[in-house]
Image (cartoon, helix red, strand yellow):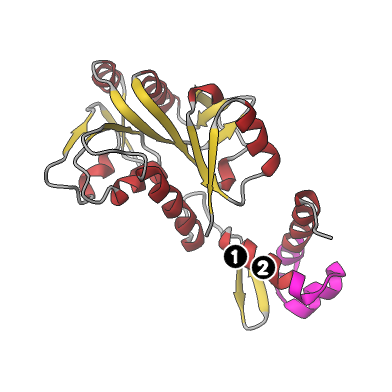
Amino acid sequence: MKSSHKTIKHRRDKLLDLLHTETTLPVKEISHKLDVSEITVRRDLIALEKMGLVQRAHGTAQIVQKTGTEDYNEEIEVLKNAIAKKAAEYVSEGNTLFINTGSTALSSLKHLEDKRVTIVTNNVKVASLDHNPNSTVILSGGEIRFPKEALVGDIAIDSFSKMSSDISIIGCSGLSIENGITTPVLHESKINSLIIERTNGLVIVVADYRKIGFSSNFTSGNIKDINYLITDTFASPEVVREIEKQGVQVIQVEI
């Protein structure tokens, strides 16, 4: 009989606890400690590796060591890139597109291919990307906040308040039923709210599984402000169902 999501999550949480305690373990030993087959352990480890939580090598597994929230993680970047690529499919030739400072939102620009668009953003990093030579890139102006290179403040707010978009792609730090779209930076939440308000068409939120069901400090918008949520298949099914009940179309990309 197929295991429920709750059962699988509980088993994988126990597996992660083991690796946190003993650092590196052979598959056979994990199988013994969890009282499940080696095939099941390998299946769990493959999923956890795709989630950027473990590393597998020669019949063993170890936890991915992290020293900070902004550490580069190749597996997480693969997830974010797949989400970004899917979001880019909803941008049409000639659109005016709002992008916020989210890294996944920014990555969607790499997948616009040959589409001619007008991009409006408060993300200074947009200048380092290659763009269609017939496209237009507009920076909002404002005070630059490092290390994220986000433009915020009255000038940025004034810029967005005088424009509107056909579509917006927004990244976030958390997305929950209780608190909606959230970010840890107050100044950015004000810009994000304005981006949502000034969008005439689709509002697309891009967020990997780590953000779904979690909240950060400041709310940028409500769940019902979202037309599409693009995430991955590792997102909590329970939270995804609740989000869908609010009228949001959820698209989960597979890796």
Q: Is residue 97 above or below residue 195?
A: below
Q: Is residue 210 left or right of residue 114?
A: right
| Residue appearing at x 57%, y 62% in the figure | 50
Determine if the magenta segment contains residue 34: yes
The number of numbered discs placed on residues in the rendered structure image is: 2
Residue 48 visible in rendering = yes
Quadrant showing the N terminus: bottom right
Residue in the foreground of this view, choosing between 70 and 235: 235
Q: Which residue is mark 1?
A: 49
Q: Secondary structure at mark 2?
A: helix
Label 1 CA crowd tier, 10 Å (few <14, some 14–19, many 20+)? some
> At label 2, which amino acid type do we have?
Leu
Q: Which residue is mark 2?
A: 45
Q: Residue furthest bottom?
A: 58
> At label 1, which amino acid type do we have?
Glu
- In the rendered image, residue 233, in percent from the top left (x then y), is placed at 59, 51
| Residue 190, image quadrant | top left
Q: Is residue 2 above or below residue 124?
A: below
Q: What segment carries the magenta color?
A: 17-40
| Residue 179, image quadrant | top right
Determine if the magenta segment contains residue 60: no
- In the rendered image, residue 147, in percent from the top left (x then y), is placed at 36, 43
Q: Is residue 19 left or right of residue 195?
A: right
- In the rendered image, residue 72, in percent from the top left (x then y), is placed at 45, 58
